[in-house]
Amino acid sequence: MAADTSDTASTAEPTGGSAGSRPNVHIQDATKSFGGRVVVDIDDLILGTHPIEGLIGPNGAGKTTLMRMITHAISLDKGTVTLSAHDNDGPVVLSNLPTSSMAQHGVAKTNQVITDFEQLTILDSMLLSIAKGPDERAYKIYREQGLYADHIDEIQWYLDQFDFEDPYGFAGSAGEKKLLDIIRCLLLRPRVLLLDEPTAGLPDHVRDQLMELIKQKTAEENMAVVIVEHDLHVIWTMCDYVHFMAEGSVVLQGEPAYIRDHETVIEQYLGSGHV
Amino acid sequence: MNLDWLDAFLVYGLFSVLMVIGLALLLHLQLGLARIANFGIVGFWGLGMYAFGVLFVRVDWPFGEVWAFLISMAFGTLVAGLAGLAVGWVIADLDTDGVLVGTLGFATCVWIVATTEQDLTGGALGMGGLGFPYDIGSVKANETLWLAILAIVVALILYYVSRVHKSSYGRLLISIGDNEPLARSLGKRSFRTKLLLFAGTSAAMGFLGAIFGVMERFLDTGNLGIDITLAAMVALVVGGTTRTWGAVVGAALTVAIFDILFQSYIPFPQSWYGQAIPNIREMTFGAALILVLMFRPNGMLGEMRRDKLMRRMHGS
Amino acid sequence: MDIISDSIVVGLTEQAPLILAAMGFALLYRLTGLINVAYSETITLGAYMAMWINTTFDLNFYTILIPTGILAGLISVATYFAVFRPAKLRHVGGLEMIIISFGLSVFLRHGLQFVFGYPVRFFDVPAPHTIFVLGVGVSSFRLVAVISVFVLALGLFWFIQKTSYGLQIRALASDEGLAQVSGIRPLAVTVLIWFLAGVAGGLAGAFYGVGSAAAPLLGWRQFLFILLVVLVGGAKNIGGVIIVGAITAVSLTFMTLQFGQALYSQLVLIVVFIVILKVRGTRAAEAGKV
């Protein structure tokens, strides 16, 4: 099923940064099936024409799978994913690269389920994210202090924003782990940031703080954000544009208000009890 | 300096304990940090030993003994490193079962080649002609100096390992061992990192093998059994796989008891030393692996404690 | 003599114990997910047990197979209760479990030398009859080994596919939690698996032992090949293991006849099998990336 262009609202005008210079991800003719069942089948989709975009849809619509296809954490059956960052690099075909090259090209994805390094502390996680290949050579056994000195301001900024119990210790609660997962990605300074259910497990005030911060970062840095989220309040307040996915394809696109009131969405997803 | 207390048994016991500490420290980088279970330590160690020995003994060196010795040492290290590169390439993206087969298979291959290529290695009969690159007097003096050289090498390895824990490189290794997909998503090239780690540590194991060969003066395939792999693994597991000092503490609690305490200080009946004590040694090592991993999986020193380290390094 | 038919007859009869052992190992690996390094000691103990029964009670080789199989099965179950079950209840990780089984292997290998002594021990059996198969002389013991492989393979197949216990084993292997809910007693079934694996290993040991002698390293020497056969043959079905085991047996013999050196053929086989595993493993990693 292809995105039905007649349903696409044309009124959306990107805000914050010009549309031409914003990094975007172009997914073409991409499919993925598991055990014979087609999970994702995208004809042509561009993510990132607006600063913050939402990706919603019922369970099993293929949202998380699509995100993992973008970072090549799962291979595509066919099709391509291309990153256009509009800088000196030119377009990069992400679907030809290993997952470990994504960060280098500025694509980062947070994890839906809580994912953390059991052996690493909060500070460790942040330094790990910041460190680049040359910092981590086997013979650079004295590099750590320099790395720390170079980046402590940036780390401290995040630590000031959020209330971690003990930055030298391990992330304790599910909320801290979730938050740390997102900060790790932000520290990569991504050009395209994919947030997979970022608010699940976060206390309300942290969630609001985090969303504010994402907005701020998106405005300050030339970054495109895509949010997969079940908490639709977040989608309606955060996003400039929303893609609605069902059965592996994007069936509807438009501004939040447009999607919110569209009968297909209400029927297939929100249900009649939706407020 | 009075070295009367240092008899041949003690020199040899200390040498074998230091050897095991060196190998266990290298295994710590592989298994403790990057979680690569190397069951073929003896393969890399033995390859270094034989590559060194064969080059040194079989080649008609046109120049001085010392240079021939050093070149052969470098050759042994290099060959073991290249083998580590090849085996590392095979196992770096396989699961634990694959790593077990790959490393065990490699060790068996080394044994087979050492056994069959009799013209080069002397096969099961063995090969003599190795010796110290110096002569400072008595056998005891020569051996003691070689022991001191090994001690320096092992101390350097220990220093390197302790620096790795405090460096960004160590953090990278830990992250890959801990959660490889997550590390990859943060841009860490896990395959390349594991490959280079394995090659480097294998080269160092080969170097230690060459050092061992010099002390033995005689190479035979009996050295290529599972014993040295077992000893290094037991030392590391008993001490603590994830701790810098794990290998040292573990070796003191296991190999040192059998190879120093029982050999030099406890007067067991002479007949026990032939088969009973070596047999009990291996049995105890096997039991130690089971009991420690079951009841104290982090070994005597306990878990890694990055929190303490971070506070010490970066705390205000 | 034709080298092909020689390789087939000699290979299959000489390496039948390998196939037998691989079947037992695969059963355990497939159904409990465990790479049990100590399985090599089940084989060694099978050889010692058979030798001990043979020399103590003066029974002929065919008769001792039954008590040997049962004893080896019981020892296998005992290792499960003494080591693997407690370890599992303590949630020991997969890598640590392999190291534990390695430790047990070493422990048993050296422990049995206290019981049976250090020198290798020989069976006290009359020289086997020689039977000609395709013009190649084969010892009757080896023919019995081949027959055992067939009988045990058919028995296992029948047992796993056709009986209610087999159904329970399969259910347990695919989903332990679900199996437990549906009223299967995992413990009884698990014990049965360990017993059967032990029987296969013990008999393999008896056949290895009567061909040469009972020696401490008997099982360990075979372990790498068992592991390779099982991993390459795929632990999913016994059929794959038997086929790869048979290919291994024939090609080992063929290459040994060609090179005149058994170790070279082992070397070639190890390298080839590891390359196969590498190619397959990389593909699996590609498919299963998180």
Image (tube, coloured by chain):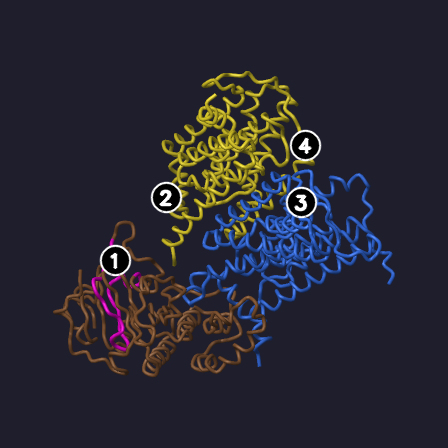
Chain colours: A brown, B blue, C yellow
Quarter the C terminus of chain B occupies: bottom right
Residue drawn at point x = 69 percent, y = 50 percent:
B213
> Observer-nearest residue: A121 or B63?
B63
Give me the C-alpha separation between circle 2 and circle 4: 46 Å
Between label 3 and label 2, give the one nearer the viewer.
3
Residue placed under numbered mark 3 in the picture: B223
Q: Which one is in front in this view, the residue at disc 1 or the one at disc 4? A: 1
Disc number lying in front (4 or 3): 3
| Residue labelled with disc 4 | C116
Point 49% across, 16% down: residue: C132
Residue B14: horizontal and vertical position, in percent?
75, 55
Residue B305 picture location, percent across and down: 57, 67
The chain to which mark 2 is attached is C
Q: Which residue is mark 2?
A: C182
**Helix, strand or loop for disc 1:** strand
> Helix or strand or loop: what does disc 4 sit on?
helix
Q: Which quadrant of the structure image shows residue A63? A: bottom left
| Number of the front mark, 2 or 1 | 1
Q: Marks 2 and 4: CB-CB under 8 Å?
A: no
Tell me the chain of label 4. C
Alpha carbon distance from label 4 to label 3: 25 Å
In the picture, measured across the screen, residue C181 lies left or right of residue C125, that is left
